[in-house]
Amino acid sequence: MRATTSRFALVLAAVALAGCAGKGKPRPTPELPAPRQAPPVAQVQDGDPCALVYEHDEADYTPGGLYRPGQRDHAPAGRPDLDRIAEPVPRAEPLSRYGNRPVYSVLGRQYRVLTDVRGYRERGLASWYGAKFHGRATSSMEPYDMCAFTAAHKTLPLPSYARVTHLGNGRSVVVRVNDRGPFHDGRIIDLSYVAALKLGVYETGTAMVEVEAIAPEGPVLLPPPAAGPTTVWLQLGAFGERGNAQALVARLRQAGEPARLVEPADGEPPLFRVQAGPFTGASVEEAKARLRLLGLPATPIVIGN
């Protein structure tokens, strides 16, 4: 017992000496990286759960096209009244100028866009996306509205229509496909927040569904878009505050880069887009290199053919 007590006393003495030796020579505290913050939001209309819009910065894209992969997506603070949101009525529409390349690649995988939607039916996993992307440009360059019945699909033409049926509860909804995704193995469609809410997918996060393309009256054969002009604009950011967008335009012009501010159209979320350009041919890649030197995104969105 005495031997044990002595050993314990020696340990305490050693700890005390170590503490004394450290006094006067504090170890420097390592600097920790600042926590990643969610982007600022702009309140469009009080009381509307779908009114919050992020200020989107294209610099938050990772190589391959993922947007803010470290930030969790989420639903709005309140629940919209689904009875007051009408499902889209399928109709023949011209193909979007954007998002309809016959073949495109994301994360090293190639996808081929369908030219004929007749007979397309597939079963698989559905997921959803919400406030993280609300107001941001979709692949068709329409603003994403989490409170409209829309969806993202890897190969259906943009825009097109589909009926999505939850295989677990039998609920179904018509969606307008205006975006690309989801680029996750095993998932076949990414539903807007309200579409997921109506189907019962929101509560579980994912669910097995059947997706059936709807060919509206009019041409059902959807040809690839005709080749357009080679002029492109490089989108560098979308801001909820006009002043922030103007500041970036001024910075670009001071550096000798042509730039413009694109105002939101009537009925669109109040996002002010900054685009550099126009550029053609080899000057596009040269412009990207110059923008990287300015600390601007290395992979901005290319708007054009």
Image (cartoon, rainbow, N blue to C red):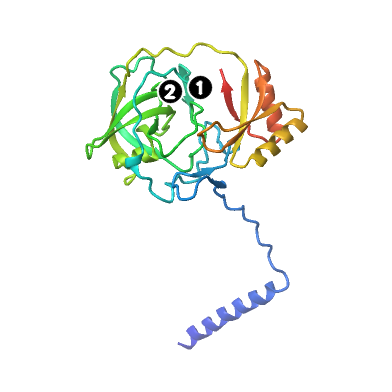
- Cα–Cα gap, marks 1 and 2: 8 Å
Of 215 and 293, nearer the camera is: 215
Of 294 and 129, nearer the camera is: 129
Residue 120 in which image quadrant: top left
User: At label 2, which amino acid type do we have?
Assistant: Leu
The image's mark for residue 147 is: none
20 lies above or below 55: below
Quadrant where the N terminus is found in the figure: bottom left
User: At label 1, which amino acid type do we have?
Assistant: Tyr
Residue 220 in which image quadrant: top left
- Residue 254 at what x, y percent from top left? 77, 32
- Residue 36 at what x, y percent from top left? 57, 49
Q: Are marks 1 and 2 in contact (CB under 8 Å)?
A: yes
At 29% across and 42% down in the image, what residue appears?
A: 200
**Residue at image mark 1:** 98
Local SS, label 2: loop
